[in-house]
Amino acid sequence: MAEVDVILKDGNKKKLELKNSIFSLKVNPVVLSEAVRAYLLNQRSGNASTKTRAEVRGGGRKPWRQKGTGRARAGSIRSPLWRGGGVVFGPKPRDYRCELPKKKKRLALKYALSDFYKNKKFIVVEELNIDEYKTKKAVEFLKKIGVDAGEEKILIIDEPLKKEIRLSFRNIPKLEILPVNNLNVYILLWADVLVLTENALKRIEEIWG
């Protein structure tokens, strides 16, 4: 069974067993790729819009007569060939939403957690132990557990996530702090370091175990 060291408040460590059904899976990169693609598509608002020559205001009158001027023929000042004219095949509002089956979504998250446990910096702490709710104290805490704030891409998961804790970590560059319910495959693949509180780890095992 997979094991991890939990860093206690006093700096000592204890062993904790992890569920193999989450942290010891053989990763399928295709499923991860599909989950990331779905996540990114679902972030798109899809509201880019342009006007065709029929929708641009004006341009109903023929700018000059058809023959006899020496100029090229023109039927409207809103032709796509003209400055200020309509757009040909421009974007229109569309729905980019991409739904993954629930089973596949759960499996992708487990794969991402397994990959993190095997190949990246996976840290579990008893709790986010900060004396004062200040960014300086948050940086000191990270240093104490062996994480370079501002250098590595850090993902912190806490449960429940207090507002004061979130604000303390918010100003640190390359750092995201989330509750368990907001955990997703994209953010896990983005991060170099995962810091979990013991409560967050238990909650993850309850939901996805």
Image (spheres, rainbow, N blue to C red):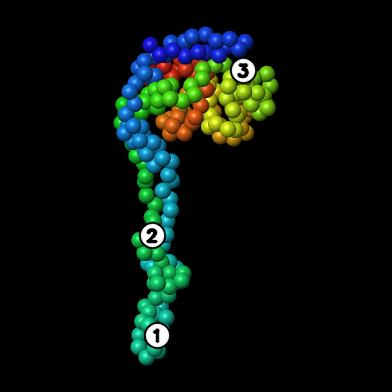
Q: Where does the image place residue 5, in percent across and percent down from the top left?
A: 50, 13
Which quarter of the figure has residue 63?
Answer: bottom left
Q: Where does the image place residue 44, in percent across and percent down from the top left?
A: 42, 44
Q: Of 34 and 97, which appears nearest the observer? A: 34
Location of mark 1 (residue):
71
Q: Of 35 and 192, which appears nearest the observer? A: 192
Tell me, yes or no, if residue 69 can be seen here.
Answer: yes
Instruction: State the mark number for residue 119.
Output: none
Q: Quadrant of the N terminus?
A: top left
Instruction: State the mark number for residue 90.
Output: 2
Q: Quadrant of the C terminus?
A: top left
| Sequence-earlier tag: 1 or 3 | 1
Q: Where does the image place residue 107, in percent across and percent down from the top left?
A: 34, 25
Nearest-to-viewer mark from 2 and 3: 3
Tell me, yes or no, if residue 159 can be seen here.
Answer: no
Considering the numbered disc 2 on the image, is that residue within a helix, a strand or a loop? loop
Q: Residue at x 34, y 32 (%)?
A: 29
Amino acid type, residue under disc 3 in the picture: Asn
79 shown above or below 183: below
74 shown above or below 48: below
Location of mark 3 (residue):
129
108 shown above or below 46: above
Q: Residue at x 68, y 21 (%)?
A: 132
Amino acid type, residue under disc 2 in the picture: Gly
